[in-house]
Image (cartoon, grey):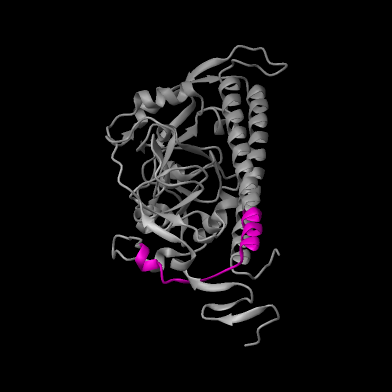
C-alpha cells in the first residue's frame, strides 16, 4: 500500500511522520480515585469528580487542575471528564496523575476518542483497569499540534454549548408564553371576549387503545402508537405522513380494531401511566388529514372531538399550562407508577377562548416551535461536524500545523 508524503506506516496503521507511536501508559499516568462517602464530605467548593463527572463538592482537593477522570464502570465506563480547577477524584473513576508534558485539554479529547469498550477487564460488569489499558498503542503529535487540535475542538464545543443554551432559553420563552397566553393572563391585541370553562368530557369523547406489546411491532402492517413513543417524543404532535416510515407497525386485520382506536386528524392521545409527575399529562395531537389507518395502542387514552370548539393546532399547547398539569397530577393515582383513568380525565377543566383567538395563540407558539426546531437542526449538525473533526484531527488525517 502506497503511503503518501508526510505519513509513515506504523504498528497501528498510517500516521504522520512526526507523530510518535507509544503506549497509553507512556502518554499519561493513571491512578484509581479516592473513596469519599457522603458522611465524610465537608462543605466546600472543591468538585468531586466521579465516573459521570461532577457528583458533589468537598473542602479538600487531592488532584491539581486542569485534570481528567475516566469512568471505571457502569453506564459511564470509559467516559472522560475534564476539570479546569483542583478537584477530588472519586474512586468510581481513574484520574491522570501525570501528563508527561502533554497538553491536558488535548489529552481529554484524545481519551474521548478511544473506544474503551474493547478493553473491559471486568466481564459482565464492565470495569476499566489502568494496568489493562496501559499497553494500548496510540500515535500522538507534538505539543504544538496538540494545542492547535485542542483549541479547534474547544471552539466547536463552545459553539455547541452556545446553541444548547439558546435552545434552553427559547424553551423557557415558549413555556412563559404558554402560561400567559393559554390562561388569559395576557391577551393578544384585538381580543377581549370572556373565556368559557369546559370540562374535558364536554369537549371530547374518551376511549382507549388496542393493547399490543412492543415485541409485536415491526416494520410491517399498520401504524401503531405505543405509549412509550409518546413518552419519548419531544413534540406534542405526530404527523403521520411525514413520520410514516419511523412509526412502528402492527400486522393485524383492520376488522379486528375498534373504530374508537383508529386515530383521525385532530385526535389527542394521552398516556394513562407514567413513572414521574411530568409524564402524567404527556400527549400528542394526531396530524392525519389523509385518514391513513393509525391505531392507538397500549396504555393510551384517546380523545376525539365532540364539538368544534378547540382548534387542532391549539390542542398542541392547551394541555401544557401549570393549571392543567396540576389537575392531571390531582387525578393521577399510584405510587411508583401514576395512572389516570378515562373517568377522571373527563373531569379536567379547560379555559376555552374563541376560535380566532385560539388560532392566533397557536400561530405564535408554532413560530417559537419552528425556531427551536431550526436551532436543534443546527445543534445536530454542529455535533456531527465536531465528531468528524475529532475523527480527522486525532488520527492526523487532517493537520493544523
Q: Residue furthest bottom?
A: 1
Predominant SS along the magenta part: helix
Q: Nearer the viewer, residue 138 or 309?
A: 138
Picture residue at 68% right of the left edge, 67% below the top: 399
Q: Nearer the viewer, residue 178 or 45?
A: 45
Image location (x, y in percent) of residue 391: 59, 65
Q: Residue furthest right?
A: 190
Image location (x, y in percent) of residue 398: 67, 68
- Specify start and end residues of the magenta stretch as a single range: 130-153
**Left or right of 278 in this view: 152:** right
**Where 353 falls versus 384 (above or below)?**
above
**Where 194 falls versus 133 (above or below)?**
above
The N terminus - image quarter: bottom right
**Where 7 falls versus 214 (above or below)?**
below
**Left or right of 173 in this view: 303:** left
**Left or right of 22 in this view: 227:** left
The C terminus - image quarter: bottom right
Based on the picture, tell me whether residue 141 belongs to the magenta stretch.
yes
**Left or right of 119 in this view: 320:** right
Based on the picture, tell me whether residue 369 belongs to the magenta stretch.
no
Q: Quadrant of residue 208?
A: top left
Picture residue at 47% right of the left edge, 42% below the top: 86
Asked whether the viewer can see residue 288, the reply is yes
Picture residue at 55% right of the left edge, 31% below the top: 315
Image location (x, y in percent) of residue 309: 57, 25
Asked whether the viewer can see residue 259, the reply is no
Q: Nearer the viewer, residue 203 or 137?
A: 137
Q: Nearer the viewer, residue 224 or 151?
A: 151
**Where 238 falls versus 206 (above or below)?**
below
Amino acid at each position: 500500500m502506497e503511503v503518501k508524503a508526510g505519513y509513515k506506516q506504523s504498528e497501528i496503521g498510517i500516521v504522520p511522520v512526526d507523530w510518535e507511536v507509544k503506549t497509553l501508559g507512556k502518554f499519561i499516568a493513571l491512578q484509581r480515585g479516592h473513596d469519599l462517602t457522603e458522611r465524610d464530605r465537608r462543605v466546600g467548593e472543591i468538585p468531586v469528580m466521579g465516573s459521570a463527572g461532577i457528583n458533589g463538592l468537598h473542602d479538600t482537593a487531592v488532584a491539581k487542575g486542569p485534570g481528567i477522570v475516566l469512568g471505571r464502570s457502569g453506564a459511564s465506563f470509559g467516559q472522560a471528564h475534564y476539570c479546569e480547577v483542583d478537584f477530588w477524584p472519586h474512586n468510581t473513576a481513574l484520574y491522570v496523575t501525570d501528563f508527561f508534558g502533554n497538553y491536558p485539554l488535548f489529552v481529554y479529547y484524545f481519551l474521548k476518542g478511544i473506544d474503551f469498550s474493547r478493553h473491559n477487564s471486568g466481564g459482565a460488569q464492565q470495569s476499566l483497569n489502568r494496568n489493562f489499558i496501559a499497553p494500548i498503542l496510540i500515535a500522538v503529535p507534538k505539543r504544538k499540534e496538540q494545542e492547535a487540535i485542542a483549541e479547534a475542538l474547544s471552539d466547536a464545543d463552545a459553539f455547541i454549548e452556545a446553541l444548547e443554551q439558546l435552545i434552553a432559553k427559547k424553551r423557557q420563552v415558549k413555556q412563559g408564553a404558554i402560561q400567559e397566553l393559554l390562561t388569559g393572563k395576557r391577551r393578544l391585541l384585538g381580543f377581549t371576549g370572556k373565556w368559557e370553562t369546559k370540562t374535558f368530557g364536554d369537549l371530547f369523547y374518551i376511549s382507549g387503545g388496542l393493547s399490543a406489546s412492543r415485541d409485536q411491532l415491526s416494520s410491517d402492517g399498520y401504524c401503531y402508537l405505543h405509549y412509550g413513543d409518546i413518552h419519548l417524543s419531544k413534540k406534542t404532535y405526530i404527523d403521520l405522513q411525514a413520520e410514516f416510515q419511523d412509526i412502528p407497525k402492527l400486522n393485524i386485520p383492520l376488522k379486528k380494531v375498534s373504530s374508537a382506536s383508529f386515530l383521525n386528524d385532530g385526535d389527542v392521545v394521552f398516556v394513562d401511566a407514567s413513572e414521574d409527575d411530568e409524564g402524567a399529562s404527556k400527549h400528542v395531537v394526531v396530524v392525519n388529514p389523509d385518514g391513513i389507518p393509525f391505531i392507538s395502542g397500549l396504555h393510551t387514552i384517546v380523545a376525539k372531538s365532540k364539538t368544534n370548539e378547540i382548534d387542532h393546532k391549539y390542542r398542541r399547547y392547551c394541555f401544557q399550562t401549570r393549571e392543567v398539569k396540576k389537575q392531571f397530577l390531582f387525578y393521577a393515582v399510584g405510587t411508583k407508577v401514576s395512572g389516570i383513568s378515562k373517568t377522571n380525565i373527563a373531569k379536567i377543566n379547560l379555559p376555552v377562548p374563541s376560535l380566532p383567538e385560539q388560532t392566533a395563540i397557536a400561530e405564535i407558539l408554532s413560530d417559537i416551535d419552528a425556531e427551536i426546531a431550526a436551532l436543534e437542526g443546527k445543534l445536530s449538525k454542529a455535533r456531527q461536524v465536531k465528531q468528524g473533526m475529532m475523527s480527522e484531527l486525532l488520527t492526523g488525517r487532517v493537520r493544523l500545523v
